[in-house]
Image (tube, rainbow, N blue to C red):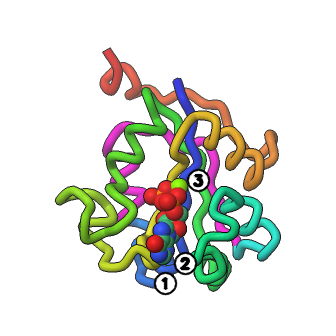
């Protein structure tokens, strides 16, 4: 099973969408193995979004992601990285496929509600930024045999 890092961004938290988004993750059959709320320090945000340093939207992006609390999650499941990227939809909510989280709840690329790692390598890096190993939990679910063949 693969793990990925997901994060409900400050706009998602402010708009009361935490429950909606976590519900979608649970109903899909994915398993939450890490969960916490925090306001991201600026240096951590700059590290998390390091690949975008120097781009015109970098400073507004760091301002946005540090502007209020986020919900940080580690989610486990079959092909968790690509599965959750599909569930999120394209970066620009107006271009995201109908029914995806960004298409359903968002309007603007700079207020697109949710973050998800874009590769297993990014997932490992981002999980390490936001979670200590002891904060991730290993547990089984009785209904997993009804989720996976
Ligand atoms: P992703 O979140 O879909 O992986 P990235 O290209 O990694 O998209 O960009 C990271 C975040 O930076 C986006 O989710 C979005 O919030 C913001 N962003 C990306 N491109 C732009 C832009 O052109 N204008 C404003 N914000 C942007
Ligand atoms: Mg990205």
Extreme residue in the top direction: 149
Residue at left offset 54%, top offset 78%: 10
Residue nearest the observer in this picture, 79 or 59: 59
Image quadrant containing the C terminus: top left
The reply to whether residue 36 is in sight is yes
- Mark 3 crowdedness (10 Å alpha carbons): few <14, some 14-19, many ≥20: many
Which residue is denoted by mark 2 in the rendering? Answer: 10
Pointers 1 and 2 in contact (CB under 8 A)?
Answer: yes
The reply to whether residue 115 is in sight is no
Q: Is mark 2 within 8 Å of ligand 1?
A: no
Picture coordinates of residue 49 (x, y %)?
66, 62
Residue at left offset 48%, top offset 80%: 11
Q: Is residue 34 magenta?
A: yes
Instruction: Please tell me whether mark 2 sits on a helix, a strand or a loop.
Output: helix
Is 123 left or right of 103, judged from the image as shown? right
Sooner in the amino-acid sequence: mark 1 or mark 3: 1
Instruction: Determine the CA span between mark 1 and mark 2.
Output: 6 Å
- Where residue 127 is drawn, which disc sits there? none
Instruction: Please tell me whether mark 3 sits on a helix, a strand or a loop.
Output: strand
Q: Is residue 49 above or below residue 131?
A: below
Picture coordinates of residue 106 (x, y %)?
32, 75
Magenta region, residue range: 20-38
Is 81 left or right of 132, judged from the image as shown? left
Picture coordinates of residue 130 (x, y %)?
73, 55
- Mark 2 crowdedness (10 Å alpha carbons): few <14, some 14-19, many ≥20: many
Residue at left offset 54%, top offset 29%: 2
Instruction: Please tell me whether mark 1 sits on a helix, a strand or a loop.
Output: helix
Q: Is residue 93 above or below residue 10?
A: above
Which residue is denoted by mark 1 in the rendering? Answer: 14
- Where residue 73 is drawn, which disc sits there? 3
Sooner in the amino-acid sequence: mark 2 or mark 3: 2
């Amino acid at each position: 099973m693969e793990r990925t890092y997901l994060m409900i961004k400050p706009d998602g938290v402010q708009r009361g969408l935490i429950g909606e988004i976590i519900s979608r993750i649970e109903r899909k059959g994915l398993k939450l193995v890490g969960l916490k709320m925090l306001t991201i320090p600026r240096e951590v945000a700059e590290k998390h979004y390091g690949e975008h340093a120097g781009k015109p939207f970098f400073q507004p992006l760091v301002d946005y992601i540090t502007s209020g609390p986020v919900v940080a999650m580690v989610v486990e499941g079959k092909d968790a990285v690509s599965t959750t990227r599909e569930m999120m939809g394209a970066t620009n909510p107006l271009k995201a496929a109908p029914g995806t989280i960004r298409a359903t709840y968002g309007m603007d690329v700079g207020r697109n509600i949710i973050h998800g790692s874009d590769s297993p390598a990014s997932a490992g890096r981002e999980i390490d930024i936001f979670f200590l190993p002891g904060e991730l939990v290993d547990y089984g679910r009785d209904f997993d045999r009804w989720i996976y063949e």
